[in-house]
Amino acid sequence: MDTESTYSGYSYYSGRSRGSHRHGERSRDRHKSRSKDSRSEKSVTINTPPAEPLLGDSSVRGEQVQDDNWGETTTAVTGTSEHSLSQEDIVRITKDLEDSVGLDCRRYFTLTLAVILGLLVFLTPLAFLVLPHLLWPEKLQSCGTACEGLFISVAFKLLILLLAVWALFFRPPRAGLPRVFVFRALLAVLVLLFVVSYWLFYGVRILDSQDENYQGIVQYAVSLVDALLFIHYLAIVLLELRQLQPCFSVCVMRSTDGETRHYNLGQLSIQRAALSIIEHYYCDFPVHNPALLSASKSRAAKHLAGLKVYNVDGPGNNVATGLAHSQSRAMIAAAARRRDTSHNELYYEEAEHERRVRKRKARLVVAVEEAFTHVKRMQEEEQKKAAGDVMDPREAAQAIFPSMARALQKYLRTTRQQHCHSMESIQQHLAFCITNNMTPKAFLESYLAPGPTLQYSRDHWLSRQWTLISEASVTSGLKDGGVFLLKCVDFNLVVTAKKIPYIQMSEEYIDPKSHKFVLRLQSETSV
């Protein structure tokens, strides 16, 4: 009996070991097949292993890079990340560097030409006054009181012109445009031709003849300064006043999510209108969130992933050509049948998502309000404590942040905003709210709803270069029905211009004494 039980136990364990051995062989085979499949599907993304820090110091790397799971174990400012760099990123970075070098050279070249032209303009009247004293001082007539008064006039007019030119032209550039600003180039050419004409007349009529009437020379210089002031007034009209009156209504639509805004613009060229639209985009449009766009793509992929077509006749059949057409027809028919019920799935998915968002929001609001109550209690009690126990806003934010970190991270994940807010930026915003005695609702406003693009970190929205795509010349003005694109890395802005119509208004006079009324009562009406 004992031997039989021993033998049966041995056979049980031996059978179990053989079964586990076969299971291990099958797992190894599956592992080999997975490794072969993974080796067959190569990617151009270069991922650095997290165990090998980029700079050789894991502590420095942990301080610089944040983990996406900062809300799970938020007890210290640490974390790990995985850096990736593709060949397309390298090519784009190289192209951006080349474009930036070209833009910098063009900007400095334009600035150099503007400075040279400005020096020529301001030194010309002074040269008209000084050259006669240097070349033929003994022949000049004495300058009377009227002539000396003209000196004061020239000095103050040049000072006014200097300040006006500095205020209008020497401002920090807002952007680098693809083409030259036509009106500014025309004004520069006009000033150059004007100054050259005055020099030619001065050289022929005054330098060659060595004119002795110095008062006339001074009046000639005063006329030059007056003409330069009038040209500056023309520049104000062309560059600033002309575009103030709205003439076009432009519709700006983001290509990825259809976010739309409307703006009124004046008489602008296409490139200047594009610059104005980009400036409005950063202030008015909510930040672009690619994570919100992946839901529809994953839903469509999920529907198509469940469709399979089998070849019953085998791969060696002679009717392989007709099989492809039959497979495509079967796929289309199956997709049409699945599409009839897809709206129900979409409805329940959106309802479930809204329920989860409301639940996460309620937990987040409670956690933040509780954390802010702790800050208020600390502020009331710190007045009785020693100076060494007082915390600054940064330390107070770090002290209360772990109590709300988990709820905030879950809410950001549910609303797909986790990539827009890092732990460092949230702590800085929390310290800012504590410093300015802001309420929990004011703190949460930045996370409960997507804000304008400028609200977020520059790494998430700043594009180094925009590409203007237009069928018409970018230096031409806006036209009714004109369309152009502003291309960025992740999306496009489609701009459509419509001319504001001419409005005809008429007047109709109504005599105030004509407002007379009569109360009409019926037998069924109760008063």
Image (cartoon, rainbow, N blue to C red):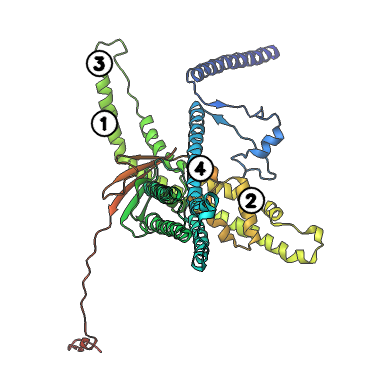
Q: Of the residues under marks 4 and 3, which one precedes in the sequence? A: 4
**Mark identifier at residue 112:** 4
The type of residue carrying mark 3 is Thr
Which residue occupies 26% across, 31% down?
333
Determine which of the numbered discs, if any, sits on residue 333 in the image.
1
The image shows residue 471 at horizontal and vertical percentages of: 30, 39
Q: Give the residue at mark 2.
A: 427
* The disc label shown at residue 263, or none: none
Q: Element at badge 3? A: helix
Inter-mark Cα distance, 1 to 4: 68 Å
User: Mark 2 or mark 4, which has the lower sequence index?
Assistant: 4
Mark 1 crowd level (few <14, some 14–19, many ≥20, 10 Å Cα): few
Is residue 416 in view from this perspective?
A: no
Q: CA distance from mark 2 to mark 3?
A: 63 Å
Q: For the residue carrying disc 2, how many other residues have a C-alpha within 10 Å: few (<14), some (14-19), or many (20+)?
A: many
> Label 4 is placed on what type of residue?
Thr
Q: Is residue 306 placed above or below 504 in the rendered structure?
A: above
Q: Earlier in the sequence, mark 2 or mark 3?
A: 3
Spatial CA distance of label 2 from label 4 is: 45 Å
Looking at the image, tell me whether mark 3 or mark 1 is earlier in sequence order. Answer: 3
